Amino acid sequence: MVEPEYSAHATLNEDTHSPSASELLHRFHYDLAGTPTPSQITALSTITTPEHLLYGSDYVWTRHPPLPSS
């Protein structure tokens, strides 16, 4: 039987070559739909790049005044 490269039962002393938590968080894309606060954006910018900060939503959560009717 072949041992898997990464074991779910690895101990802290074993070198599994797994990415660290910060490396994994850096890979995520973060959706800022709604009303993110400056502190949230600052915190996210410390763990990832601007290309991973996105604004996308299925619904308009940010309140904007209605457009005037024509």
Image (spheres, rainbow, N blue to C red):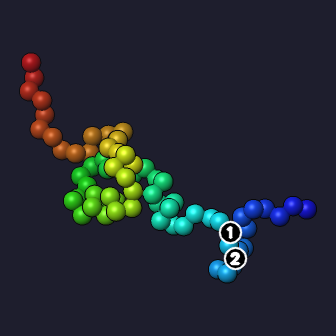
- Pointers 1 and 2 in contact (C-beta within 8 Å): yes
Amino acid, disc 2 = Glu
Q: Where is residue 22 in the image (x, y as percent from the top left)?
A: 47, 65
Q: What element carries label 2?
A: loop
Q: In this view, does 40 lie to the left or right of 26?
A: left
Q: Is residue 68 left or right of residue 21?
A: left
Residue at coordinates 64% horizontally, 80% vertically from top-left?
12
Q: Where is residue 2 in the image (x, y as percent from the top left)?
A: 87, 61
Image quadrant in which you'd find residue 39: bottom left
Q: Can residue 18 be seen in this view?
A: yes
Image quadrant in which you'd find residue 42: bottom left
Residue at coordinates 48% horizontally, 54% vertically from top-left?
27
Amino acid, disc 1 = Thr
Q: Mark 2 points at which residue?
A: 14
Residue 45 or 66: which is nearer the viewer?
45
The disc label shown at residue 16, or none: 1
